[in-house]
Image: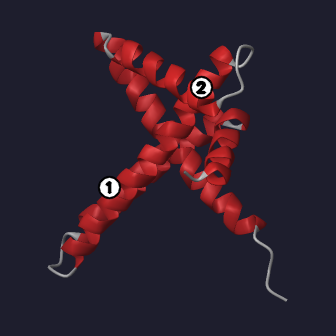
Amino acid sequence: LATRRMDVLSQEVTLRPMRSFALGVVAWLSALIGFIVLCVTLIGIPIALLGVLVLTFISYAGICAVLQTLGGTLVQHRTKNPYTHLAVGCALFLLVGAIPWLGGFFTFAVVTMGLGAAVASRKLSLRLRPTPA
């Protein structure tokens, strides 16, 4: 749906995967602290719930970018179709995610890297916007 945005996310995952993972860990911790702080007051509770909804949406977008990049790494020599790359990445995520101990670690890594890529690409897109003259 947002091909330019997904390309930026996939590029971020491809070029700097460990930075994306580290930013994802920091984003999760910041979101947890922010949620706890906002839930102290009655006015902050709806804002905290809205934040959880936004964080969930951003995480899913990042997960799609990570899985597309993973699938593209595996089948790039066969096809250039990004939907095929996403399908292969999702199939691999389904298979590896079903393994008892490894699946949890793999899921954590994919979700954290996806969130970190979304945070990093958002910061990058803010920096690359042209200033109005």
The amino acid on which the numbered mark 1 sits, given as a three-letter code, is Leu
Residue nearest the viewer, comparing 94 with 82: 82
For label 2, count other residues whose C-alpha is less than 10 Å away and answer few (under 14), some (14-19) or many (20+). Answer: many
- Asked if 43 appears above or below 45 in the picture, the reply is below
Q: Which residue is drawn at 40% across and 31% down?
A: 108
Q: Nearer the viewer, residue 48 or 30?
A: 48
At x 75% / y 14%, what residue is drawn? 77
For the residues carrying marks 2 and 1, which lies nearer the camera in this image? 2
Q: Residue furthest bottom?
A: 133
Does residue 105 lie above or below 55 as drawn?
above
Q: Is mark 2 on a helix, strand or loop?
A: helix
Residue 63 visible here: yes
Residue sticking out furthest to the right: 133
Q: Where is residue 25 in the image (x, y as percent from the top left)?
A: 46, 43
Q: What element carries label 1?
A: helix
Q: Which circle marks residue 32 in the picture?
A: 1
| The label number, if any, that marks residue 85 in the structure image | 2
